[in-house]
Image (spheres, helix red, strand yellow):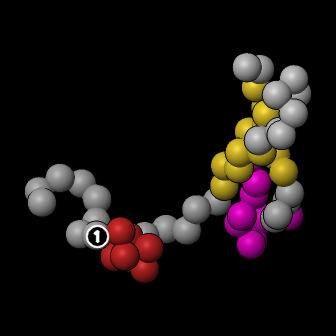
């Protein structure tokens, strides 16, 4: 492989930088209610660690 990136996903996991945000899909079981896409801060050095940052409601 001659492009950018890592040799494998495993190498990326061990040698790459840690993610700082996690995207979480929250699917509602009621089809008349909105689903939500949230961001969660997963940077242990942040004061907002483990807090939901943005919650976007989606409409079907």
Question: Does 24 sit above or below residue 58?
Answer: below
Residue occupying image coordinates x 75% and y 57%:
41
In the rendered image, residue 43 lying in the magenta stretch gets the answer yes
Q: Which residue is mark 1?
A: 8
Q: Nearer the viewer, residue 48 or 36?
A: 36
Question: Does 40 sit above or below residue 7?
Answer: above
Q: Is residue 5 left or right of residue 2?
A: right
Residue occupying image coordinates x 76% and y 25%:
58
Secondary structure predominantly adopted by residues drawn in magenta = loop
Tell me which corner region of the image, top left, top right, bottom left or bottom right, holds residue 42.
Answer: bottom right
SS type, badge 1: loop
Q: Can the viewer see residue 47?
A: yes
Residue occupying image coordinates x 66% and y 55%:
22
Q: Callout 1: few (<14), some (14-19), or many (20+) C-alpha neighbours within 10 Å?
A: few
Name the spot of residue 17 as percent of width and height, x first.
Answer: 49, 68
The magenta segment is 39-47
Residue occupying image coordinates x 55% and y 68%:
18
Q: Nearer the viewer, residue 8 or 5?
A: 8
Tell me which corner region of the image, top left, top right, bottom left or bottom right, holds residue 31.
Answer: top right
Name the spot of residue 2 as percent of width and height, x first.
Answer: 11, 56
Q: If the image is split into quadrants, where does the C terminus sit?
A: top right
The tally of labels here is: 1
State the residue lying farthest toward the bottom: 14
Q: Is residue 32 left or right of residue 15?
A: right
Name the spot of residue 36 as percent of width and height, x first.
Answer: 79, 36
Q: Is residue 47 left or right of residue 17?
A: right
Q: Can the viewer see residue 54?
A: no
């Amino acid at each position: 492989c001659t492009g950018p990136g890592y040799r494998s996903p495993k190498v990326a996991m061990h040698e790459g930088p840690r993610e700082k945000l996690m995207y979480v899909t929250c699917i509602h079981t009621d089809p008349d209610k909105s689903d939500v896409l949230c961001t969660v801060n997963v940077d242990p050095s942040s004061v907002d660690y483990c807090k939901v940052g943005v919650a976007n409601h989606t409409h079907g």
